[in-house]
Image: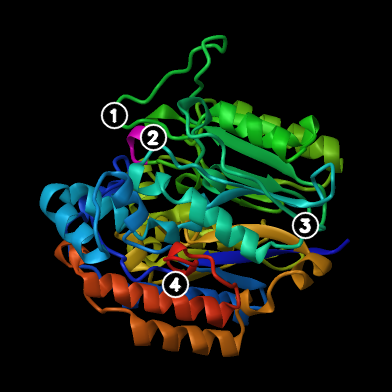
Amino acid sequence: MISQEVNFDGLVGPTHNFAGLSHGNVASMSHGGRRSNPREAALQGLAKMKFLADLGLPQAVLPPHERPSLSTLRAFGFAGHDAAVLSAAAKSAPDLLVACASASNMWVANAATVTPSRDSADRRVHFTPANLLSKFHRSIEAPQTTRTLRAIFRDGKHFVVHEALPAVAALGDEGAANHTRFAPAHSATGVHLFVHGHRVFVGNPPLIAPKKFASRQALEAFEAIVRRHRLRAPTVVHAQQNPAAIDAGVFHNDVISVGNENVFLYHERAFSDTAATIAAVKASYARLHGGAEFHALAVPAAQVSLRDAVGSYLFNSQIVTLAPDRMALIAPSDCAENPRVRQFVHRLIERGTTPLQAVHYFDLKQSMRNGGGPACLRLRVVLSAEEIAALPPTVMLNDANYFRLTCWVKKHYRDRLTQRDLADPALLRESRRALDELTQLLRLGSIYPFQLPGA
């Protein structure tokens, strides 16, 4: 069964703003309060998608969520018509309104954890939407994420979209941002590396905790997902994030390591015991694939410090397969602007001893200022040709869809937005019109609460 990796990128939502909501995310915290440009943000994301599609890589889109979330505001006791709810929240609970207006759902690496059919016991693709309970503004995403995934991956013969894990501390789940799959090719059986920051149950040995920022991913959550997705024990490796890296701003593992097929690029301080983690991955890979080559590429702190890694988002790049043994790094332009990071990347490629043979830099400044790079913007889903055929074809990006989506963005999105604008009822109306039109363009049916009868 020949499979390909399809990148499902999140479309940036119309309320994209800089609110600095994500404690522990250095970029998000440092840009809070600045004026944003939702139109530019969405077009920057689409430009990256189009480039990858033009390279011949399967590329798809995930629609944004409705924001502000009126249902959340009403759950907090605000009542009346929509404009009254927004006005009252802006006056008495402005921080709540800002959280309910966050466009953080654009970073779909946190949308779910995915297991390809090649690896699951029932030979179906499994999705578990992340509960994201560590941050309030993200914890409200799971219901819409579940509806969206079920609208796209609707064929029960091929796909299973589970409910999110219960929103309790022992099951704190941040999705695919802490998960990496390794295999000689996407079609082969994979080794799954699940990276957690903490354990909850007393029976487990205590772990060293970060001192400045809290970890977000619980070991128990990934253990539950392994059971749900029916993964076999020999294909699974669990590892702990380095608490010092978390304190440096590494809120998810995809800010400190990135892997693709048989290549793993990681910072030497990524894990609490990096040597043991790499040894465990290599051992599992060898058990599955014998002597097949595996490239474990350590990035020394002497060449790229944790500060440079977090500031440039080097490890939040994508590694994509262009052909057998030929890969490219899709990096944010911030990597090119950091001389130490740029030098490391170009020396790595010039060595010619790994499948990494090219780097492409992208201006994703609007996303980067909120703490999300190329890898944050995409959910990786390995699919067979038959599984791709079971998707709504309109979610796949081609020239025609790219043109339609860029026109849609230019028609509906504002080119400047401040936190004061989030209380504007006109912004809510504009957003709903945009999303209603988008569901028609993508032929997904009614997936938003405002589209349902009685809304």
Q: Are discs 3 and 1 less than 8 Å apart at CB?
A: no
- Residue type, numbered disc 3: Gly
Image coordinates of residue 127 in percent, x first then y, are 65, 49
What residue is pinned by disc 3? Answer: 156
Q: Secondary structure at mark 1?
A: loop
Residue in the picture at 49% in, 63% down: 346
The reply to whether residue 351 is in sight is no
Residue 24, image quadrant: top left
Q: Secondary structure at mark 3?
A: loop
What residue is pinned by disc 1? Answer: 212
Which one is closest to the eye, mark 3 or mark 1? 3
Image coordinates of residue 119 in percent, x first then y, are 80, 46
Q: Earlier in the sequence, mark 1 or mark 2?
A: 1
Q: Earlier in the sequence, mark 3 or mark 2?
A: 3
Residue in the picture at 38% in, 65% down: 336
Q: Earlier in the sequence, mark 4 or mark 3?
A: 4
Q: Which mark is residue 246?
A: 2
Q: CA distance from mark 1 to mark 2?
A: 8 Å
- Residue type, numbered disc 2: Ile
Q: Are discs 1 and 2 less than 8 Å apart at CB?
A: yes
Q: CA distance from mark 4 to mark 3?
A: 30 Å
Q: Which mark is residue 45?
A: 4
Image coordinates of residue 295 in percent, x first then y, are 68, 48
On screen, 403 above or below 345? below
Tell me where the magenta segment starts and ends, as one range: 245-249
Q: Secondary structure at mark 2?
A: helix
Q: CA distance from mark 3 to mark 2?
A: 38 Å
Q: Which residue lies most toward the front here?
A: 454
Q: Earlier in the sequence, mark 3 or mark 1?
A: 3
Q: Are discs 2 and 4 less than 8 Å apart at CB?
A: no
Q: Check disc 4: other Cα within 10 Å, few if <14, some if 14-19, many if 20+.
A: many
Residue 380, image quadrant: bottom right
